[in-house]
């Protein structure tokens, strides 16, 4: 995907001309390899736009010039996907080789085939997972931060309910019945600390519910013992050990975990994990 426009979606009084100048300067400096100067420019961007529509915080972390945030800002994720909603499937599937929903279906067929009464698709995007899993779920709810994405998904008439909002916030605060299948096929790359995610998934699932998700990762020597970090493409990478710890902490038993290619960037495969887990009965 191309760079987000940091001015898009802003509602507070921002000096848009100064913001655009600082952001474009930061990008140019980063691409030229002058990371110290780029970092200074990204800090200017954050000062002008604290909500961080342009993702300056994850870019700083990606360059090793800033602390790793707990997650990408909601404003950044919403802006990024709002801008690409129209061409999202072409970019993600055709150009980047993204096939995680299909991989998820195959994994579910092997270890947890269903059928399911209520499915929750976190970060549903344009509904790729819903289309592939529609026949094994009686009712499907989708949520995405991008209102434009939700509009595209709604036109497909695949989901029974759709919400615009943050996935983790929905897990903790939505006034809905719990689910027996929760999917998150492109959510974790925008979250660093996963404690709230897994706690919410446990909270909004019934005993025995299935949780299916993908994550991106990096070689052990790059992660260097870290649970997560921002990778070279401004998305979070997680260690397999950390994923296992989060599952165990929040009452999920792993049914299957395997290495996958999540997508391709610059012609190179992006490694990741596909995990199918089941919520243990409450004590």
Image (cartoon, grey):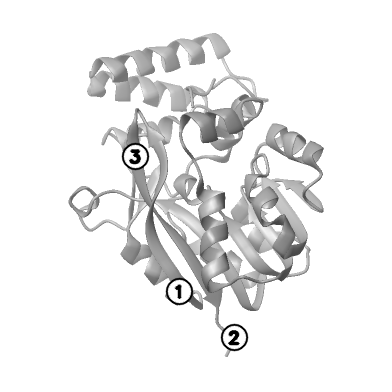
Q: Secondary structure at mark 3?
A: strand
User: Where, quadrant-wise, is the C terminus in this rendering?
Assistant: bottom right
Question: Left or right of 189: which side holds 126?
Answer: right
Judging by the rendered image, the residue that carries numbered circle 3 is 269
Q: Secondary structure at mark 2?
A: loop
Q: CA distance from mark 2 to mark 3?
A: 38 Å
Which dot marks residue 281? 2
Judging by the rendered image, the residue that carries numbered circle 1 is 254
Residue sitting farthest toward the bottom: 283
Residue 153 vertical placement versus 241 (above, below): above
Q: Do we see residue 22 in this rendering?
A: yes
Residue 268 vertical placement versus 13 (above, below): below
Q: Nearer the viewer, residue 185 or 260?
A: 260
Instruction: Looking at the image, tell me whether mark 1 or mark 3 is earlier in sequence order.
Output: 1
Residue shown at the point (45%, 10%) measured from the top left: 21
Q: Nearer the viewer, residue 219 or 262?
A: 262
- Name the spot of residue 169 as percent of width and height, x first: 64, 55
Residue sitting farthest toward the left: 221
Q: Nearer the viewer, mark 1 or mark 3?
A: 3
Q: CA distance from mark 2 to mark 1?
A: 14 Å
Q: Nearer the viewer, residue 29 or 244?
A: 244
Residue shown at the point (27%, 18%) measured from the top left: 37
């Amino acid at each position: 995907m191309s760079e987000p426009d940091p001015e898009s979606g802003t509602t507070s009084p921002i000096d848009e001309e100064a913001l655009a100048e600082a952001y474009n300067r930061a990008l140019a400096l980063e691409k030229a390899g002058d990371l110290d100067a780029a970092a200074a420019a990204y800090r200017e961007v954050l000062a002008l736009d604290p909500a961080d529509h342009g993702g300056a915080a994850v870019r700083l972390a990606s360059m090793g010039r800033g602390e790793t945030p707990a997650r990408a800002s909601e404003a950044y994720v919403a802006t990024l996907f709002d801008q690409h909603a129209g061409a999202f499937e072409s970019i993600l599937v055709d150009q980047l080789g993204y096939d995680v929903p299909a991989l998820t279906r195959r994994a579910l067929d092997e270890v947890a085939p269903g059928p399911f009464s209520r499915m929750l698709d976190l970060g549903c995007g344009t509904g790729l997972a819903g289309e592939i899993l529609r026949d094994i779920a009686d009712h499907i709810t989708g949520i995405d931060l991008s209102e434009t994405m939700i509009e595209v998904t709604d036109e497909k008439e695949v989901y029974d309910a759709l919400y615009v909002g943050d996935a983790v916030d929905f897990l903790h605060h939505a006034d809905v019945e719990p689910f027996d299948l929760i999917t998150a096929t492109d959510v974790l790359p925008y979250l660093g600390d996963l404690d709230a995610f897994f706690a919410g998934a446990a909270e909004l699932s019934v005993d025995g519910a299935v949780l299916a998700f993908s994550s991106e990762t990096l070689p052990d020597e790059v992660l260097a013992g870290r649970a997560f970090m921002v990778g070279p493409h401004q998305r979070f990478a997680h260690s397999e050990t950390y994923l296992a710890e989060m599952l165990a902490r929040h009452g999920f038993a792993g049914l299957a975990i395997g290495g996958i290619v999540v997508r391709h960037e610059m012609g190179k495969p992006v490694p990741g994990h596909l995990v199918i887990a089941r919520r243990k009965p409450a004590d």
